[in-house]
Image (spheres, helix red, strand yellow):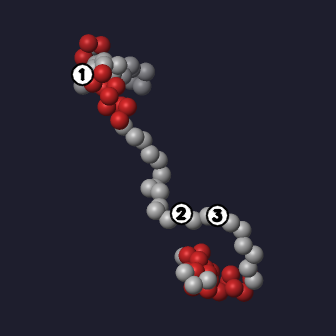
Amino acid sequence: MDKTSAILPEDDDPASRPDDDIPDMSTPYWTERFDKAIVTRGRPKAEVTKISTTLRLDAEVLAAFKAEGPGWQSRINAALRRAVGL
């Protein structure tokens, strides 16, 4: 077989099936199921959401939190919650 030979579809390839073998997706059976399908993208929404904001901090304070490694924003949030009594 040389490189210019045509690639023929296999017997089980959907493209080689007759049209009467393909289900009619406009029937009530399929329409009802597609209408109920909910497509969600990304991770699930959290019960408690946070607000994105800009906050000016002393360089030393930020460096201290970042030096503790990943999760520094959560640690700042926890420290602020303790400071306000939450």
Instruction: Report the residue at 35% width, 35% height from top.
Output: 36
Q: Which mark is residue 80?
A: none
In this view, 23 is above or below 76: above
| Cα gap from disc 1 to disc 2, whole angstroms | 52 Å
In this view, 52 is above or below 34: below
Mark 2 packing: few (<14 Cα in 10 Å), some, or many (20+)? few
In this rendered view, identify the residue nearer to me: 36 or 5: 36
Which residue corresponds to mark 3? Answer: 52
In this rendered view, identify the residue nearer to me: 73 or 5: 73
Amino acid type of the residue tagged 1 in the rendering:
Asp
Q: From where the camera sits, is residue 74 visible?
A: yes
SS at badge 1: loop
Q: From where the camera sits, is residue 67 visible?
A: no
Amino acid type of the residue tagged 2 in the rendering:
Thr
In this rendered view, identify the residue nearer to me: 83 or 7: 83
Which residue corresponds to mark 2? Answer: 49
In the image, residue 16 lies at what x, y percent? 30, 18
Pick the quarter of the image with the C terminus: bottom right
SS at badge 2: loop
In the image, residue 59 lies at what x, y percent? 74, 82
Which residue corresponds to mark 1? Answer: 11
Instruction: Report the residue at 30% width, 13% height from top.
Output: 19
In the image, residue 37 lies at what x, y percent? 36, 37
